[in-house]
Amino acid sequence: MSNKSTPTERRIILKNADDPNYSNKIGCYLREGGYSMLKKSCKMKPEDIGAEVLKSGVRGRGGAGFPAGMKWKFLDRKSGKPIYLICNADESEPGTFKDRQIIHKDPHQLIEGMMIAAYAIQAKQAFIYIRAEFFEGARILESAIAEAKAKGFCGDKILGSDFSCDLVVHRGAGAYICGEETGLIESLEGKRPNPRIKPPYFPAVLGLYQCPTIVNNVETLCNVKHIMEIGGDEFAKIGKPNNTGTRIWCVSGQVKKPGYYEFECGALTLGEMIYDVCGGLLPGRSLQAVIPGGSSSKILRADERFSGKLKDGTEFDWGVEDIPLDFDGPMAAGTMSGSGGIIVMDDTVDMVEAMANINAFYAHESCGQCTPCREGSLWMRKITQRMCDGGAREEDADLLLSVANQIEGRTICAFGEAAAWPTQSFIAKFRDRFEEKVKNPERKKSSLQLI
Ligand SMILES: Cc1cc2nc3c(=O)[nH]c(=O)nc-3n(C[C@H](O)[C@H](O)[C@H](O)COP(=O)(O)O)c2cc1C
Ligand code: SF4
């Protein structure tokens, strides 16, 4: 447990989100100075906005953590084809629930960020691809877009300029793979969301309708407005080098105060988040494991230690609770911050049950294009389910590992890794629990349900 004082949130994206005097209507947003950054941006050269985003160092908040400014630079502007902007609001990674908060509580912040981004990349058509199950979120966005159009903030000749950009909400198809950017694009085109192979189908070159397309996460696009407000250099001072800005962390599992919290990148450690911010574990429980970035990220065992050198040359020697909450910290510990979904597991969790739960999710969500993913995810589900049902065999841990290893790196999209990494890390770190299932085969119900 940390001895330091409780770290305080720094709310930039969620600044107004939980203010009882704030609503998602445009009046509230304008009262807070909303759309003034769009006004400022429309008077700038589009490439100068891109330069600010590049300087800010802001990394994508959807999972991969790729720098947004660099992605925008890769956009093929010479093709003469239309350019599209897509906001990825699919938020399908188990353990993640931040984008929906922004959409429900401050939709105009997203619309302003998107319109600035659309102007910067000169996209005349923009989409918000929202998860199918977010009925209310889609309704709120549609109503906010109508308000913004009526005031000239999107649509024809934005704020009297020569720039026009239509913004449309597209309801998703209800599958995890619709969150993968090329699957999303296929779905937006009206097809089954089968991911495309990269190369050649990098969206910035061959995206929607084979045209240059930028796909960014909700939280990433909201940051664009704040970058324009203070400039890329100032933004880069928030957080840490290579880990700039704030991040919204979603904490679930067995802590006293689960929820979403926004902190400067690297301002606190995983232990501080669990014990100081989230009030610690339930009475009488001890920490068993943490999944730090949504169910696809590799699990951390509570008693693990990590040592080495960070990219900037700093040496580190951490226990799990010392891992800094940013992009590079979890990566140095052999996992990732992914979509910011921190899942805390105490000593009551049956790790084989938890594994079975995660495997059931991936087996259900595989699009089926690649044999290793389609068959492998199903086998992993069957094996872990059988283990939970009292039929564990001695060879199961190795069998699971062998299946997972044959998925990783052999598929069209990163879903293959998303499905393989949980199994690989659970077996590596909790092999004793899998062996225990062979010796003690009775079914035990886990208190943790990931899906
Ligand atoms: C299986 C899979 C599911 C994904 N789901 C989401 C998602 O729900 N939301 C999201 O923003 N990104 C998701 N991503 C990442 C997107 O492919 C893409 O990298 C991201 O939308 C880019 O935005 P960013 O650069 O702003 O993070 C997923 C990736 C994979 C491989
Ligand atoms: S890795 Fe899985 S989800 Fe991705 S394309 Fe292949 S079968 Fe589909």
Image: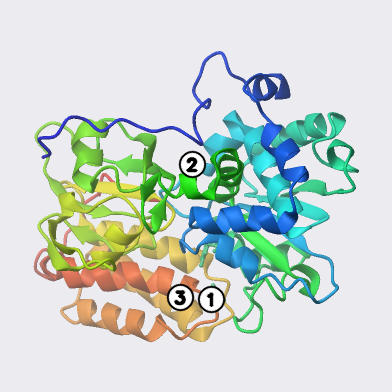
**On the image, numbered disc 1 is attached to which residue?**
413
Residue 44 placed where, x, y %? 74, 48
Look at the image and tell me whether residue 401 can be seen.
Answer: yes
- The residue lying toward the viewer, choosing from 383 and 426, is 426
Q: Residue at x 27, y 66 (%)?
A: 312
- The residue lying toward the viewer, choosing from 262 and 371, is 262
Q: Quadrant of ligand 1?
A: bottom right
The image quarter containing residue 185 is bottom right
Residue 431 placed where, x, y %? 15, 70
Residue 134 placed where, x, y %? 62, 41
Above or below: residue 150 compared with residue 395: above
The secondary structure type at the circle numbered 1 is: loop
Specify whether tag 2 is near ligand 1 (CB below 8 Å): no
Is 40 placed left or right of 238 in the picture?
Answer: right
Specify whether tag 1 is near ligand 2 (CB below 8 Å): yes
Q: Residues within 10 Å of mark 1 (few under 14, many from 20)?
A: many
Q: Gap between marks 1 and 2, in whole Å?
A: 24 Å
The secondary structure type at the circle numbered 3 is: helix
Q: Residue at x 86, y 49 (%)?
A: 163
Q: Gap between marks 2 and 3, in whole Å?
A: 24 Å
Q: Amino acid at mark 2?
A: Lys
Q: Gap between marks 3 and 1, in whole Å?
A: 6 Å
Residue 148 placed where, x, y %? 79, 33
**On the image, numbered disc 3 is attached to which residue?**
416
Is 358 placed left or right of 25 in the picture?
Answer: left
Q: Residues within 10 Å of mark 3 (few under 14, many from 20)?
A: many
Q: Amino acid at mark 3?
A: Gly
Q: Earlier in the sequence, mark 2 or mark 3?
A: 2
Can you tell which mark lies on residue 98? 2
Above or below: residue 346 compared with residue 292: above
Is 340 placed left or right of 283 in the picture?
Answer: right
